[in-house]
Structures are given as structure tokens and as C-alpha cells.
Image (cartoon, rainbow, N blue to C red):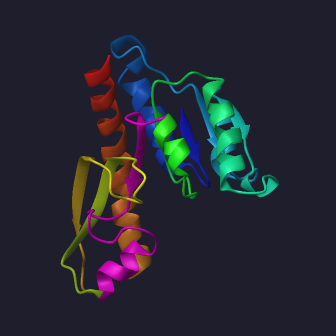
Amino acid sequence: MILISGGGSNMAAIVRAAEREQWARRLDARVAAVISNKADAAGIALAQAQGIATDVVAHQHHPNREAFDAALADAIDAHAPALVVLAGFMRILTPGFVARYEGRLLNIHPSLLPAFPGLHTHRRAIEAGCKVAGLTVHQVTVELDHGPILAQAVVPILPEDTPETLAARVLSQEHRVYPRAIADWLSQTS
């Protein structure tokens, strides 16, 4: 199960890896569905084009985070996934939701955690004078961007970098590292 909010590039990388590496045969795993909190998320069309079930649980249709998370959990549970993967899902999840999927909820964050949790990671890394940046795949816990680390990748920060150029280099590594971390998690739990 993959949760998205936008274009779905990490979702597409995961789907490609699952097919290329034959996760269905080798790991008894497949992408069961893609759910977005935004009806206009381009990733929904990408998933549909691959024949993957999709759903939209629009956060603005719920009076609070708890109600949204309850509706999201119902949509997830309809597919009975072994793993829930956040791939550009831009919502902070409630403690109850995190507890419901404890140990099987993964996220990718565009920094070398514990540095720069939250938003605007690339700008913050450049402004801090860092020589490197990167990404972290981690288990989701109640504390934002602080769960156990499963994988990281490092990219240099170049003198001419802008937040956008750095983000593009980090994203290319996300597409490589996230599917591998998911496959590793699946192989350890099957």
C-alpha cells in the first residue's frame, strides 16, 4: 500500500522495482493500492495506468485529523496490506494512526535524519553550510521524522546549488534507495 499526495515519482519507482525484481514471486508482495489525500494528485493516474487500485481520501472532507485518519485507515484496511509506505504523503499522522500500523509504516524523508526534520530541508541544509545532504528511509513513529532508520544515501551540496537543484539530486537517489529499503523490509518479515 502506497500513500501519496502529489506526482507519485517515488511510487512509480517502487512499482517499477516491484515488477523488475519480481517481488510477487520472490517476496510474495505487490503494490495492493495507491491512496492519495488529493483528488488531483498526478500519481493517481500513474497508478491507474499500471492497473493498480486507487482511492482518494480527501483530508478537507473531514472535520479534524482524527476523522481523516480513521477514514484513511478504513481505506487502507480494505486492502489488508502487510506494509504501508508513505511516498510524498504530506500529512502529519495522529498517534492513533501510527500505533495502528506500528512496525509496518515506512516513510522517506529528504534529509540525513536526524538533521532537518520537517519541511524545507534542502534550503535549510544549504543555509546551514552543510557539505552533504541526502535522504533517510525510516519507520514512522509518533515523533515526526524520528523513527528507526532503515537506509540513507548521501549527495554532495555543490557551491552553485539551489534548493531545487539539490532536491533533484536527492530525489534521483530516493528512487533508487526507497524500493531497495522496502524490499529489504519485506524480505525480513516474510
Q: Residue at x 78, y 52 (%)?
A: 62
Percent of width and height locating residue 163: 41, 78
Vertical order, 139 against 20 (above or below): below
Which quadrant holds residue 156?
bottom left
Q: Is residue 21 left or right of residue 96?
A: left
Percent of width and height locating residue 121: 38, 73
Q: Residue at x 52, y 54 (%)?
A: 88
Percent of width and height locating residue 23: 39, 20
Vertical order, 105 against 125 (above or below): above
Q: Is residue 35 left or right of residue 108?
A: right
Percent of width and height locating residue 130: 21, 80
Q: Residue at x 43, y 19 (%)?
A: 29
Quick check: is 96 in the magenta stretch?
A: no
148 or 171, nearer to the observer: 148
Q: Is residue 167 left or right of residue 91?
A: left
In magenta, the rendered stretch is 101-127
- Tell me if residue 146 can be seen: yes
Q: Residue at x 66, y 50 (%)?
A: 66
92 or 122, nearer to the observer: 92
Outermost residue toward the left in this view = 131
The quadrant of the picture occupied by the N terminus is top right
Q: Is residue 39 left or right of residue 102?
A: right
